[in-house]
Image: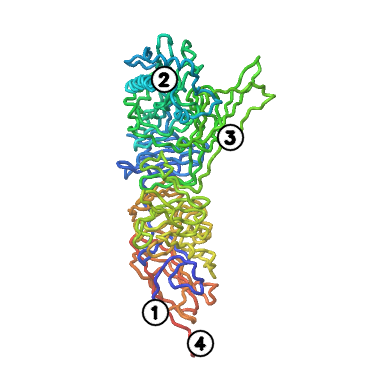
Amino acid sequence: MLQEIKYKGITRLPSDHDTFDGEMEEMYNLANSNGELRPVLPPDVIGTMPGQFIFVHKNQGYEHFITLDGADIKAYNYNGSSITLIGTITNIYGETLKKVESVGGTLIILTDKEIKYALWKNTSYIYLGNKLPFPVISFALAKKEVPITTRFWVTYDSYSSDISKLNTREGYNPRSTGDRKSSSTLLEGKSVVSSDFENAIMGKINSKLQLMQENSAFIFPFFVRYALRLYDGSLVMHSQPFLMLPSKFIPFHVSIDDASLNKIEFDFLFASKLTYSFPAISGISNYSDLIQSVDVFISSPIYSYLYDGHITGMINNPDYDPVKYYPEKIIGGFFKNREDLMNEITSVGNFYKVLSIKIGDFGTAQSTKDLIVKNLDALVNQEPMKDDYRTHDSITAENSFTYNHKLHLSGVTVTRFPGFKLGTETCYYDGAKSEAVINIGAQPFVFYPNTDCKKLHMKSTVDIGGVTNYKNTFITLSEHKLLNGSFYVDPDLKNIENVATPLPIDVIPIVYGLSQSLKDLEYNKLYVSAFQNPFYFPVESRVTLPVGKIVAIASNTQAISQGQFGQFPLYVFTDDGIWALEVSAEGKYMARQPVSREVCINPKIMQMDSHIAFITAKGLCVLSGTEVECISDIISDNNTRASKLNISSFITATSKPGLQQVYQTDDIETFLQDCVLAYEYLNGNGRIFVINGSYSYAYVFDILSKTWGKIGSDYSNAVANYPDCYVQSPDGTVRNLSAIPSSTANVSTLFITRPITLEDALLTLKSFRHNGILKSSLNTVVYGSRNGVDYTPVKSSKSLLFHSNGSPFRYFKIAVIADLKPSDVLSGCSINFEPKFTNRLR
């Protein structure tokens, strides 16, 4: 009786009793390709690099290999035939490397402490650090020279009675904190003078204010703010709003200069120009490809003048007037009250672009440059500033993924921005990382770019009689109505200072509570950068999932279901399963639905042509569309075998001692615990290589035939750069799995079949033949067993075809050790046997 058997791959399922003929107990340096066993050739060596190969930075015109050599991150150039050192990019002393990514020419290095950036430019990498440089710009107001008279007198002979009324009428004092009248209440009252006289006075005021505005003179309070303009147009790292005060509560003075002569004095000395200055930034030219400019924005004027007000009488001259010879009484009714004005100051949220400073200009210090704002009355027609969302914060991530020219981060930890420092004061913001260091100078307005911040701690020391005393002032911050942040403004619009009474250290301890580092754990959020901009992660692009933690990210490469190709471009692997992300009409990701409850336990997932491989507690799984399949369960040693051959003598006889370690292996569950995955796409639908540097072999899974094998391996890690996949040995040798090997040397191979059950009877082996295209000889041993547990050699031979005539057995195993040529192919075997009939006479 003749039986044809096709060779398959390694399995542990089903049990030995029910195994299918041709399945393998072990298979080494062989892989099933298109139903045939072929030797797996070692890929050619393409070069050697010291350290651990971690990433390929490939862009137009170059391919760089990035390594971790000790604590140094180094770059090597690969030109297709050789590997040469470019140089050291940076070091990560005291840090743990998480991952390396790239977007365009920018290299992104993730550690447990921070995200570092480097930029490839011309012939080397320029290290950019973990943050973009933030320029400190100082703004000031100076007297504005305008071609108009700012102080003048007008005699109103025909309005003597009106002037007389003003001399005897006390009006509303807008500085009185006890008077809570609003400006709307004032407008409801009637003027104490005739409408003609009031119109004459108001006409003089309005015309003068209009002339000043046309001459770009600042009269009323306003805010100025600036931000970095990146190469893609994004605005990041906004400054705090600076409150500029050409005037405070009263922008000009109108008074009765000489009642007897009916003479009115008009004084408009609060006409200012805006200036700016900044120190030089060392190495700013390194950022010229990333930062386009620093753009300056200002708010519309905060009008303290009532254009439609009424003359209400005389009011007290404010005590903060810079010119002391002003009269004690001035005409009132033109000004908003204190409460309304403060409400307007604290409600400013719109800023408009007035200047772009090229980033290269910051290479040289500049001082007292005029910032000319033309057409102040048309300011709102300029580009508005988009508000900031915590771009001063520092972030790091446990994992990353680049897709569609965007950097995706998961396992994000946010360290809060230290904040802006007020002049010489030591400042701590509630929940901030450390002492504020960005000095904005003295200000009546303080701002922290996070609404969670509730308090500012100002701390300073004072030497009193040789004894160090401490001053601690705490200022409560309020959430801003229109800006993403918290603020405080001095009620008198005076610069904020530490006004606490000095106390010795034995009376009051130094307060450290507000300087404690606070980290926000954003483990359930996916951070997505702007297009081709890994420095900016817009808040509207972030995705929040109802899970505890995002473990890894991968892109979808085929339709999830019919008619839905590309609907779910990303898979997000979480501690609660796998989620598919959908793209909204606005181009943003949305967490639509979970596609599987399988939990990835290793962030080193691998993307292939139409599959994603990842490790779970069950084993190695493959995701395709919405279907998840565990492909390692068929070789799991949890499925115990009834027998395992002792082939030590066979290995010794063939002078292949290295095969003993390969045959007596650990279970796949142990192997997977600390493995890396590699993908070789050349054969069929590709092969998955499961590599563990602690072993002298690796597992190979052929996707098309869905069969397992083993290969000899000293690989310690793998780096994918589709379609290439590089592997590295501990000695630094680098190979490319996806390059066709050029070797013609023989390959040492081994395979052992699982029990072959030809008939439900005792059988005598008559002849055996290997099928395939073979130019090499095979060392073959046929083992037989009657109970399926204990096996004994039946026949050994080096021929492809041999005959036998011995004792009958119920089960058979075939063991082969051979040095195969690259062109050799094994498809199966033909076995001729003769049943032993127990009901017949011999």
Pointer 1 or 2: first along the chain: 1
Left or right position of 421 against 474: left
Query: Foreground mark, 2 or 4?
Result: 2
* Residue found at x 51% / y 58%: 661
Q: Which amino acid does label 2 sit on?
A: Leu
* Residue found at x 62% / y 29%: 511
* Quadrant (top left/top right/bottom left/bottom right) for the N terminus: bottom left
Pointer 3 or 1: first along the chain: 1
Query: Foreground mark, 1 or 2?
Result: 2
Q: Position of residue 126 (x, y in %)?
A: 39, 33
Q: Where is residue 53 in the image (x, y as percent from the top left)?
A: 43, 44
Q: Which amino acid does label 1 sit on?
A: Leu
Please name the residue that numbered disc 1 is placed on: 2
How packed mark 3 is, by other alpha carbons closer than 10 Å (few <14, some 14-19, many 20 or more), is: some
Q: Which amino acid does label 4 sit on?
A: Thr
Pointer 1 or 4: first along the chain: 1
Query: Foreground mark, 3 or 1?
Result: 3
Left or right position of 10 against 513: left
Q: Do the residues labelled 2 and 3 touch (CB within 8 Å)?
A: no
Q: How far apart are marks 2 and 3 (CA)?
A: 37 Å
Relative depth, front residue between 829 and 764: 829
* Residue found at x 51% / y 72%: 16
Query: Foreground mark, 4 or 3?
Result: 3
Please name the residue that numbered disc 4 is placed on: 838
Please name the residue that numbered disc 2 is placed on: 141
Whether residue 88 appears in this view of the structure is no
Please name the residue that numbered disc 3 is placed on: 516
Pointer 2 or 3: first along the chain: 2
Relative depth, front residue between 401 and 751: 401
Relative depth, front residue between 189 and 299: 189
Q: Distance between the residues labelled 1 and 4?
A: 20 Å
